[in-house]
Amino acid sequence: MWAVEATSFAQWREQARALLVQNVPPEQVSWNATAANDLFGATPAPAPPPTRRRVKVPAQALALFEQAARYRSEGRWALLYQVLWRVAGGDRAALLAGDRDGSRLQQRVRAVQREIHHLHAFVRFQPRPAAGEEEPELVAWIEPAHDVLDAVGEHFCQRLGRLRWLIATPEDGLLHDGRQLHYRRPCPEQWQRWAQAGGEESALWQQYYRSIFNPARVNPEVLRGHLPLRFWRQVPEGELIPQLVKDARLGGRRYGQRETVAQQRGKTIAARPASEDQAL
């Protein structure tokens, strides 16, 4: 049994290439070196003599592997090597959704893509009025289900221009200093403190959400589909949603946004005198 361990896609790719060249099948590989050594009480087996086998993998497969590698699960590296072994042997059906392994791979890719979309939609920046010249002006804390933070950096760079901003998670962090984007894993403690100390402007987010919430059109199932429950405690408007949905069920649908709109200040327009009416 080969006992190997990977903590990143780059590390997995290097180790997987070495295993393929030496013709090591998936069933002889444990991708948790610590657990394997505890179980067998021995160090990894010595490498067999190298072969002249050439490994060719289509670029499409590598792109799928890199996406699926972001999916957090205990067996993420084992599945990737299982599919890689089959593809390198000429069985490209392993990449297809109709295949047993391919179906699991494609499901993980879709889950990662959904999580990237979630971060685009649910990151809530908070301003830091007392930020120093080298400190982030905007901070956000988010807890993604998969390792996708480094995949959203360009998205926020395009939208925030030269502002200094920070997104921190329990695992990693992204910091834009106004010129360059910096990614750190693990996330520095100072970054985490900055991000979790934000929240002074939560009232503005909540007011905005109240103003756009339309009880006449609320659909709780669709709402949970677009904003999963696990994000409700991570976004400022999350604490409002249960009460807003409850009010909608108790009659709020009938009036829609009428009460909210009626409370807004508006301009009074005097009625036109009847003498100014024009005959048809």
Image (spheres, grey):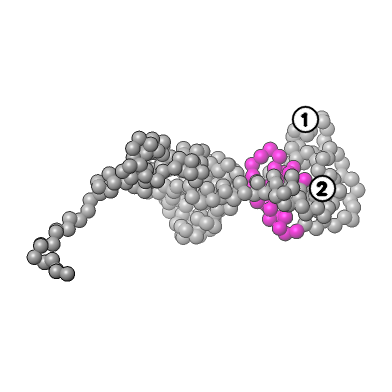
Taking the spot 59% from the left edge, 50% from the top edge, the residue there is 113
Q: Which mark is residue 19?
A: 2
Q: Which residue is mark 1?
A: 38
Taking the spot 49% from the left edge, 46% from the top edge, the residue there is 226
Image quadrant in which you'd find residue 199: top left
**In which quadrant will I find the C terminus?**
bottom left
User: Are the residues tagged 2 and 1 within 8 Å (C-beta)?
Assistant: no
Q: Which residues are magenta?
A: 58-82
Residue 81 drawn in magenta: yes
Residue 225 image offset from top left, x and y in percent? 51, 43
Residue 59 drawn in magenta: yes
What's the residue type where badge 2 is placed?
A: Leu
Taking the spot 52% from the left edge, 48% from the top edge, the residue there is 118
What's the residue type where badge 1 is placed?
A: Asp
Taking the spot 40% from the left edge, 38% from the top edge, the residue there is 245
Which sits in the foreground, 167 or 263?
263
Left or right position of 162 against 271: right
Classified by dominant secondary structure, the portion drawn in magenta counts as helix
Q: Which mark is residue 264?
A: none
Residue 68 image offset from top left, x and y in percent? 67, 48
Q: Is residue 156 above or below residue 228?
A: below
Residue 137 appearing in the image: yes
For mark 2, give the secondary structure: helix
The residue carrying pointer 1 sits among few (fewer than 14), some (14 to 19) or many (20 or more) residues within 10 Å by Cα, namely few
> Residues under labels 2 and 1: Cα distance?
22 Å
Residue 151 image offset from top left, x and y in percent? 58, 53
Left or right position of 256 against 18: left
Q: Is residue 23 above or below residue 75?
A: below
Q: Is residue 86 above or below residue 246?
A: below
Which sits in the foreground, 3 or 107?
107
Residue 9 image offset from top left, x and y in percent? 69, 49
